[in-house]
Amino acid sequence: MVKEFVEFLRQYGVIGLAIAVVIGGKLNEFVSSMVNDLFMPIVFQPLLRAAEVDDIRKLSWHGILYGKAVGAGIDFLIVAIIVFVFAKYVLKEEKVVKR
């Protein structure tokens, strides 16, 4: 029974999928930290001082947290670009030379 289970895991690539999920989750945490703790304060610091706000995520208008949305959008773009570059590098196909 254990042998069949191990064969199932190998056949369907469950181990690789689990590793990808863990790495993807940690990549998301890393990029979120970079965006929220480094990028946003450096880029938006002059605007925040002018608006007298200490954190961009607190910027709102009639209850709409647009500062948080901007941060999430930048976070998404960075993760999407990293995944695209990684997938392009890992999944690149060999070019067939025609004669």
Image (cartoon, rainbow, N blue to C red):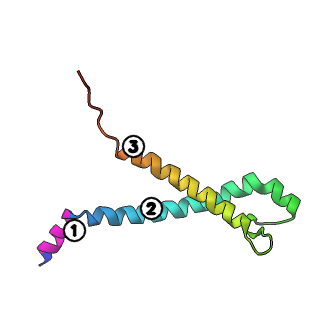
The residue tagged with tag 2: helix, strand or loop? helix
Q: What residue appears at the point 56 percent right and 53 percent down from the top-left corner?
A: 78
Contact flag, marks 3 and 1 (Cβ < 8 Å): no
Q: State the residue position of label 1.
A: 9
Q: Is residue 48 above or below residue 82?
A: below
Counting residues from the start of the chain, the first of labels 3 and 2 encountered is 2
Chief SS of the magenta region: helix
Residue 83: x, y in percent?
46, 52
Q: State the residue position of label 2.
A: 24
**Residue 73, quarter of the rendered image:** bottom right
Counting residues from the start of the chain, the first of labels 3 and 1 encountered is 1
Magenta extent: 3-11
Q: What residue appears at the point 80 percent right and 74 percent down from the top-left corner?
A: 62
Residue 35: x, y in percent?
63, 58
Counting residues from the start of the chain, the first of labels 1 and 2 encountered is 1
Query: Marks 3/1: CA distance?
Result: 26 Å
